[in-house]
Amino acid sequence: EYIKENIVVPFINYIHDQLDDVSYVLYILEKYKLRTEWFTAKDLYQKYKTIGKNYEALLEEDLRLFLFDQGIDYPFSTPKSASGRADVVSLINTEDPLVLEIKIWDSEKGYKSNRLKEGFNQIVKYANDYHKNTGYLVVFNIDNIEIEIVGKEKDNLWPDRFSFNGKTYYIIFVNMNYETTASKQGTLKKETILFDELVKDIENKI
């Protein structure tokens, strides 16, 4: 009885609390990132390079299909809200909602920090529209670079998370360019973006 009350029960309560703190949405998005980078990036990259238009629609469809396969019911694309249409919205009436925007980083098309800023701006608006405290920005990185956001205190957790106006926003980079093997890539280039630049346009409008 002593062991049960003083060791077993506290341990079970601890595990229960830890599970409560784990976001199922984050788990699924991390799984998608790994699945894409490890197994499907090459095929998806080739499709992206050959379609000629509707680039984000291709990547959005791939992500939505994966979400549905993982048990995310009705990951509808572009439902209308006051600020426009978010790319993926689901689980709105739960404690772990999914309000997500997709952007592409592709320097050949001029999609760089401008698209990242635009995506962050949008996801802030959509989180406000749906009265949710979290928002997700998934960035498909077509370039052979590492993208880093600096200027905000980090907690060394995955993915990068940023607090802004009392809400938490997650930015997830899915790296797509595997045309060159790691052994032949040479020094990996890094693109650095200041968080203050990311939110400057939003703050000026508040």
Image (cartoon, grey):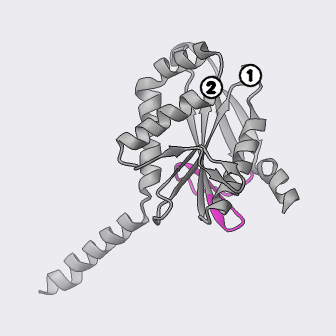
- Magenta stretch secondary structure, dominant: loop
Residue pictured at 64% horizontal, 21% vertical:
187
- The residue stretch that appears in magenta: 151-168
Would residue 141 be seen by someone viewing this image from the given angle?
A: no
* Quarter of the N terminus within the rendering: bottom left
- The residue identified by callout 1 is 109
Spot occupied by residue 66 in the image (x, y as percentages of width and height): 41, 37
Q: State the residue lying farthest toward the left.
A: 1
Spot occupied by residue 79 in the image (x, y as percentages of width and height): 59, 48
Q: Viewer-proximal residue, 186 or 56?
A: 56
Q: Amino acid at mark 2?
A: Tyr
The magenta stretch spans residue 7: no
Dot 2: what SS?
helix
Residue 185 disc label? none
Q: Amino acid at mark 1?
A: Lys
Residue pictured at 65% horizontal, 24% vertical:
143
Of marks 2 and 1, the one in the foreground: 2
Residue 55 disc label? 2
Q: Viewer-proximal residue, 54 or 158?
A: 54
Spot occupied by residue 37 in the image (x, y as percentages of width and height): 47, 29
- 57 horizontally vs 192: left or right: left
